[in-house]
Amino acid sequence: MTPQPFFFRAGLVLLNVLIIAVAENATAQNRDPASLQGLRVALDVGHSLQNQGAGSARGIGEFHFNQATARVVREVLTSAGAHVLMINEDGDLPDLLRRTDLALEEKCDVFLSIHHDSCHQKYKQKWLVDGAPQEYADQFSGFGVFCSQKHPLAQVSRQYATILGQAMLAAGFHPALHHHEAIEGENRPFIDEAAGVYEYSDLIVVKRTAMPAALLECGVIVNRDEELLVKTRAYQEQLAKAVAQAFAECLRQGVLKLGTGAHLSPTPGGSGAPVAPTTAPEDKKGLLRRLFDRPKKT
Ligand SMILES: [Zn+2]
């Protein structure tokens, strides 16, 4: 064996250093699943059995999609070390302020509301499913993220929502951009168009929560193909992993911090604030007012 010249040996050392540096960088980007250890997550299942939200192309209430996906998200977050408070899992908690109260009582560091999307009524077409008329719109698909500019930590919520949208993109999902269209009932300003992040300031769960909050529309269930896709375990797991990656990235960037939830104060008129008990049955307008500060369906 012939002795190796000095510059050759030095080159090997340099190469090793470079390989280690690249490997460490890759590790930082694909964080250990245990990296959510200590994070306290409030996971809200959107809508309820009583008010199921949007209807799918096959006439199934949005709540059922939200429940199924949120359960997989909980599974993945829990296995990554997070403490997950599932809110409204059985669809029996229509009171949105109560949901934000629960997140505060449980000292959660972050709030995520799980939903599935629809579109403006004018785009819906009719078809028959098992003999019953249903409505669909196949031209819309993808995810969307909403956050509120009126949140007490609006800037942090924006960063969290944007990181969530970016994690969805990185996981292979594409954004649904139709809520930006300048028509009544849509017209939502973009916070980050590329990442599918919108401002929706008066949604109660993203406005009244004490901790950083975002709402994730996981897919468009009025689209006939996407309705079937979002029900698959593979889609739900991929999405759940993207959520876990987003939380890990938020922690890495300091957007979310462990233990924040233990020091949060109630928000004025919202999370933790006393809510007047309802004695009389609510009319539809009253219920809508409680779902959103302005009567509007999502
Ligand atoms: Zn919804």
Image (spheres, rainbow, N blue to C red):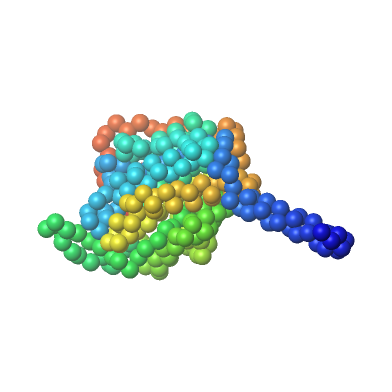
Which residue is farthest front?
A: 1
Q: Residue at x 46, y 55 (%)?
A: 145
Percent position of residue 54, x then y? 29, 53
Percent position of residue 269, x then y? 47, 39
Q: Residue at x 61, y 53 (%)?
A: 29
Q: Does residue 86 appear in the picture of this structure?
A: yes
Q: Residue at x 27, y 55 (%)?
A: 56
**Number of residue marks:** 0
Judge whether 82 appears above or below 177 on screen: above
- Locate residue 115 relative to residue 242 in the image: left or right: left
Asked which quadrant contains residue 281, the reply is top left
Percent position of residue 61, x then y? 26, 49
Front in this rendered view, residue 261 or 11: 11
Which residue is farthest right?
A: 6
- Locate residue 243 relative to residue 276 in the image: left or right: right
Judge whether 65 appears above or below 89 on screen: below
Percent position of residue 70, x then y? 39, 44
Judge whether 157 appears above or below 80 on screen: below
Asked which quadrant contains residue 124, the reply is bottom left
**Quarter occupied by the N terminus:** bottom right
Front in this rendered view, residue 273 or 297: 297
Judge whether 275 appears above or below 289 on screen: above
- Locate residue 282 relative to residue 259 in the image: left or right: left
Q: Does residue 204 appear in the picture of this structure?
A: no
Front in this rendered view, residue 205 or 178: 178
Front in this rendered view, residue 252 or 215: 252
Q: Residue at x 60, y 37 (%)?
A: 258
**Quarter occupied by the C terminus:** bottom left
